[in-house]
Image (cartoon, rainbow, N blue to C red):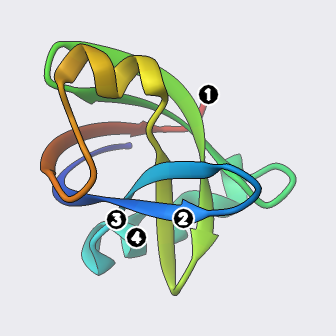
Amino acid sequence: MEIEFSGEVVEWRGPAPFHFVRLPLDAAYLVDEVKAEVVYWGVVPVRARIGDTGFTTSMFPREETWFLPLKDAVRRAERVGLGDVVDVRLSVGR
């Protein structure tokens, strides 16, 4: 399943700060429809692309949606910072 959306880069503070893009509810609904087929340990594996940078990660459920983690290497390569709105192309599953 391919999903495209725009979302704001947000921070979630844990022991160290992490940056995520929160999926809009319509995109989250699409992930929820297929999560039973791909979920493991409560996370959904994805391949994502922001700009020219592709990466793999796993999304976490939080606040009635899914949070897409942004690796530091992706943020640096695309010059993305906290509060920026980014266009994301997402492929759900391994």
Amino acid at pointer 1: Arg
Q: Residue 90: where, in percent of width, then height? A: 34, 39
Q: Amino acid at mark 4?
A: Ala
Give the residue at the far right of this rendering.
41
Q: Nearer the viewer, mark 3 or mark 1?
A: 3
The number of numbered discs placed on residues in the rendered structure image is 4
Residues marked 4 and 3 touching at CB (< 8 Å): yes
**Residue 33 appears in view:** no
Residue at 15% across / 45% down in the picture?
Answer: 86
Q: CA distance from mark 3 to mark 1?
A: 19 Å
Residue assigned mark 2: 12
Q: Which mark is residue 23?
A: 3
Asked if marks 2 and 4 touch (Cβ < 8 Å), the reply is no
The image shows residue 66 at horizontal and vertical percentages of 50, 66
Please tell me which of labels 2 and 3 falls first in the chain. 2
Figure quadrant of residue 24: bottom left
Q: Nearer the viewer, mark 2 or mark 1?
A: 2
Dot 2 or dot 1, earlier in sequence: 2
76 or 2, which lies in front?
76
Of circles 4 and 3, the one toward us is: 3
For numbered disc 1, what is the local secondary structure? loop
Q: State which quarter of the image contains the N terminus.
A: top left
Badge 2: few (under 14), some or many (20 or more) residues near its Cα, within 10 Å?
few
Q: Quadrant of the C terminus?
A: top right
Type of amino acid under label 2: Trp
Q: On the picture, is 22 further left or further right than 32?
A: left
Q: Position of residue 50 (x, y in %)?
A: 22, 29
Q: Earlier in the sequence, mark 3 or mark 1?
A: 3
| Disc 4/disc 3 C-alpha distance (Å) | 6 Å
Judging depth in this view, the residue of 87 and 45 nearest the camera is: 87
User: Residue at (45%, 49%) from the top-left corner?
Assistant: 19
Marker disc for residue 94 = 1
